[in-house]
Amino acid sequence: GLTNAPATMQQMINDILRDLLDITVLAYVDDILVFTTGSLEQHVKDVQAVFARLSTTTFKT
């Protein structure tokens, strides 16, 4: 495999989710954790925001 593939993937995820990182999202290579300190309704909105962001890219959700 490609030696730099994990670093490239991490950089792509960071670029896509940049304004959500450390606010509602933690990302590590191909793992995306969405966390919310508020209500279930807010968590659903946060997850939908991540899916919406990923759907504008070449990633499949």
Image (cartoon, helix red, strand yellow):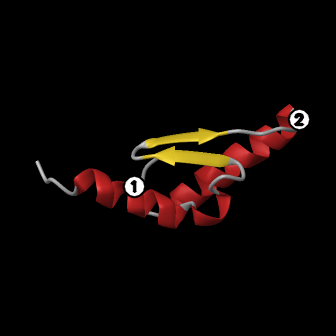
Residue lying at 66% horizontally and 52% vertically, measured from the top left: 22
Q: Mark 1 vs mark 2: which is more N-terminal? A: 1
Residue lying at 34% horizontally and 55% vertically, measured from the top left: 9
Amino acid type, mark 2: Ser
Label 2 CA crowd tier, 10 Å (few <14, some 14–19, many 20+): few
* Number of the front mark, 1 or 2: 1
Residue 21 percent coordinates (x, y)? 62, 56
In the displayed structure, does residue 44 sit left or right of residue 10? Answer: right
Task: Determine which quarter of the picture holds residue 35.
Answer: top right
In the displayed structure, does residue 53 sit left or right of residue 3? Answer: right
Residue 57: give its label: none
Residue receiving disc 2: 39
In the displayed structure, does residue 45 sit left or right of residue 29? Answer: right
Residue receiving disc 1: 10
What distance separates the C-alpha of mark 1 from that of mark 2?
29 Å
Decide if residue 56 is in sight here: no
Task: Determine which quarter of the picture holds residue 34.
Answer: top right
- Circle 2 — which element? loop
Q: Which residue occupies the extreme left position in the image? A: 1
Amino acid type, mark 1: Gln
Residue 33 percent coordinates (x, y)? 58, 39
Which of these two is toward me, 56 or 25? 25
Decide if residue 15 is in sight here: yes
- Circle 1 — which element? helix
Residue 40 percent coordinates (x, y)? 84, 32
Residue 32 percent coordinates (x, y)? 53, 42
Residue lying at 72% horizontally and 53% vertically, measured from the top left: 23
Residue lying at 41% horizontally and 44% vertically, measured from the top left: 30
How many dots with numbers? Answer: 2
Q: Which residue occupies the extreme top position in the image? A: 40
